[in-house]
Amino acid sequence: MKAHPAGAGWEELAEAHLRERGLELLERNYHCRLGEIDLIMRDGPVIVFVEVRYRADQRYGGALETVDRRKQLKIQRAAGIFLSRQSRLACQPCRFDIIGIEGAPGHPTIRWLRDAFEAA
């Protein structure tokens, strides 16, 4: 269960945004002992690990900027576990994207940062 139930709604919005652009959902809210990945998608042959962030305003930075190096490492480690358990996907190219959602719930702005960080 998510710490913030509203987060599930933002993840659904992000998923819909990516599906509209041709990506296919593989898994939502993947959990392992090393962390969590909000969305795991396929973009053609590429496996995409997606972190979804929402910010109502930018007083403390925009949504995209909140994924710091520590969070990136957690996502990368969780992605490694996911791939090790999915032998059919293990040799596929992969990337790490961030979906930043900002603004009022009725009129959010969605920003998609592809290839947001490199695998460690």
Image (tube, grey):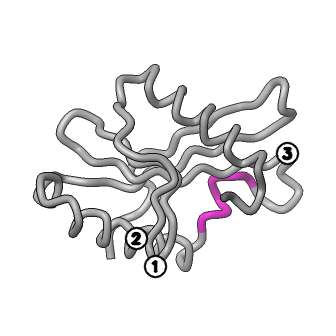
Instruction: Say what amino acid the circle numbered 1 marks.
Output: Leu
Q: Quick one: 120 or 8, which is closer to the camera?
A: 8
Callout 2 secondary element: helix
Q: Residue at x 48, y 65 (%)?
A: 31
Q: Quadrant of residue 120?
A: bottom left
Q: Few, some or many C-alpha atoms within 10 Å of disc 1 (few <14, some 14-19, many ≥20)?
A: some
Instruction: Name the front one of labels 1 and 3.
Output: 1
- Is 81 on the left-hand or right-hand side of 55? left
**Magenta stretch in the rendered image:** 62-67
Question: Which residue is identified by label 3?
Answer: 56
Cα–Cα span, label 1 and label 3: 28 Å
Callout 3 secondary element: loop
Q: Earlier in the sequence, mark 2 or mark 1?
A: 1
Residue 118, compared with residue 114, is above or below; it is below
65 part of magenta stretch: yes
Q: Few, some or many C-alpha atoms within 10 Å of disc 2 (few <14, some 14-19, many ≥20)?
A: many
Residue found farthest to the front: 1
Residue 77, compared with residue 28, is above or below; it is below
Question: Which residue is identified by label 2?
Answer: 78
- Is 80 on the left-hand or right-hand side of 93? right
Q: Which mark is residue 66?
A: none
Residue 65, horizontal then vertical, whole percent: 65, 59
Q: Residue at x 59, y 49 (%)?
A: 52
Q: Few, some or many C-alpha atoms within 10 Å of disc 3 (few <14, some 14-19, many ≥20)?
A: few
113 part of magenta stretch: no
Question: Which residue is identified by label 1?
Answer: 34
Determine contact: label 2, label 1, CB under 8 Å.
yes
Residue 112, horizontal then vertical, whole percent: 53, 39
